[in-house]
Image (cartoon, rainbow, N blue to C red):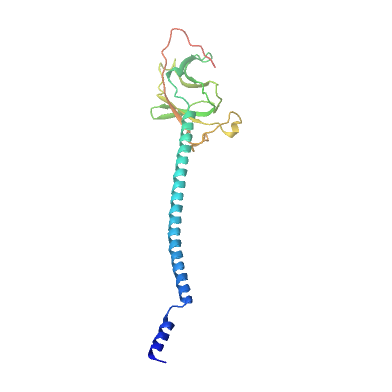
Amino acid sequence: MTILHYVAADAADSSPSITDWLTLVVAVLALAGSVWAIIYNRSSASSARSAVAEAKKAAAAAERVSQSEIDRDHEMFRPPQIGSEAFSLEVNPRTKEENLVLKFTPARTYRITGQSIEGDSHSPLSCPLFNPAGVPVRIVVDVLRPHRERSAVKELRLSFWPPAQVDKRDLWTCRCGQPLESHESAHWEVTVPVVTPPRTPAEHVYSA
């Protein structure tokens, strides 16, 4: 065998076989698959983060709407301000004393307590705790004549709550999260400046 024959044989032996080509193709496909998987996973992670962010935004928007409705209801349920026209003078036929009286009619059923403020002194008002809607509330604020011409009480602070379950009637509630029990701080507080009405020549008649 000549040298040319050996060279030709070596060249033939060193040429890639079909197996080598298949291995190369498989390796290339595997590499391409890995690259695609990385790109897909990154895209999926980005999409997932976007979905979570959008869900959080939607939840926050829904919470804002819900809180806005709760705040609106809280203000809608608030007792109206009580003005000077709610004060009157009445003569007690038994004692003949002149009483300064506050009268108002709540449009909604409330639990109500109150205090009279005279300087630094706070005194509890005699007031029914449960007050049904449409029923006048009558509170004696002060005793005037023959003791005094005008009341020394400067203002009243009335605390309001929705009715409690034990009241068993006219039940409703406020969802705002503020106290609902009358032994707690006021759910709503109304400050009423005290006014002594001008007297007329005619005697005031006591009415219950």
Quarter containing the C terminus: top right
Q: Is residue 184 above or below residue 88?
A: below
- Residue visible at 42% across and 19% down? 84
Q: Is residue 87 above or below residue 180?
A: above
Q: Is residue 3 above or below residue 102?
A: below
**Can you give x and y, in whole percent of width and height, for residue 128 in the image?**
54, 26
**Can you give x and y, in whole percent of width and height, for residue 197 in the image?**
42, 15
Please identify the quarter of the rendering in which residue 60 is found: top left
Q: Looking at this rendering, what residue extends furthest in the bottom direction?
A: 1
Q: Nearer the viewer, residue 150 or 25?
A: 25
Please identify the quarter of the rendering in which residue 150 is found: top left
Quarter containing the N terminus: bottom left
Q: Nearer the viewer, residue 115 or 59?
A: 59
**Can you give x and y, in whole percent of width and height, for residue 101 in the image?**
48, 19
- Residue visible at 40% across and 83% down? 11
Q: Is residue 176 above or below residue 155?
A: below
Q: Looking at this rendering, what residue extends furthest in the top direction?
A: 201
Q: Looking at this rendering, what residue extends furthest in the right direction?
A: 168
**Can you give x and y, in whole percent of width and height, for residue 16 in the image?**
44, 78
Q: Nearer the viewer, residue 106 or 91?
A: 106
Total labels drawn: 0
- Residue visible at 59% across and 34% down? 165
